[in-house]
Amino acid sequence: MAAHGATLEFEYDDPARARIVAESVAREIGEIDDERSRTTIDREESVVVVELEAADPVALRAALNTWFSLIDVAERTAAVGDRVRSRSGT
């Protein structure tokens, strides 16, 4: 299937934030994949790596849009959690 592919790397200030983001979006692996695209997620210290493979450019674009959105939501949610923790003093 791997006629088209992309590698996305997201670097964070610390490994804990990278872990939170990676674990949040990793739940979608297998749920989103289909016969036209596949995704893997890996984390090395402070870097989250998303590997996309697609059968055609349209499927690759759709996968890219999906995973960029998922990462964005995970990052924003983690930031909200940080603000709540800082207000509560924990």
Image (cartoon, grey):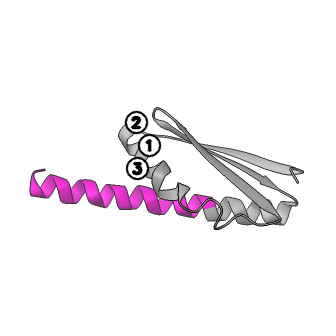
Q: Which residue is drawn at 36% across and 40% down?
A: 16
Q: Position of residue 18 (x, y in %)?
A: 44, 43
Q: What segment is highlighted magenta in the picture? A: 67-90
Q: Residue 18 carries which label?
A: 1
Q: Where does the N terminus fall, quadrant-wise?
A: bottom right
- Residue 74 magenta-highlighted: yes
Mark 3 vs 1: CB contact within 8 A: yes
Q: Distance between the residues labelled 3 and 1?
A: 6 Å
Q: Where is residue 51 in the image (x, y as percent from the top left)?
A: 69, 46
List the single residue furthest toward the front: 30
Q: Nearer the viewer, residue 18 or 26?
A: 26
- Residue ID for mark 3: 20
Q: Position of residue 24 (x, y in %)?
A: 46, 57
Q: Which residue is drawn at 37% across and 36% down?
A: 14
- Residue ID for mark 2: 15
Q: Distance between the residues labelled 2 and 1?
A: 5 Å
**Up-down relation of residue 41 to residue 76 (above or below):** above
Q: Is residue 1 left or right of residue 72?
A: right
Q: In this view, does 41 lie to the left or right of 13?
A: right
The secondary element bearing badge 2 is classed as helix
Mark 2 vs 1: CB contact within 8 A: yes
Neighbor class of circle 2 (other Cα within 10 Å; few <14, some 14-19, many 20+) is some
Looking at the rendered structure, the kind of residue marked 2 is Pro
Q: Which of 57 and 31 is in front in this view?
A: 31
Q: Distance between the residues labelled 2 and 3?
A: 9 Å
Q: Nearer the viewer, residue 10 or 19?
A: 19
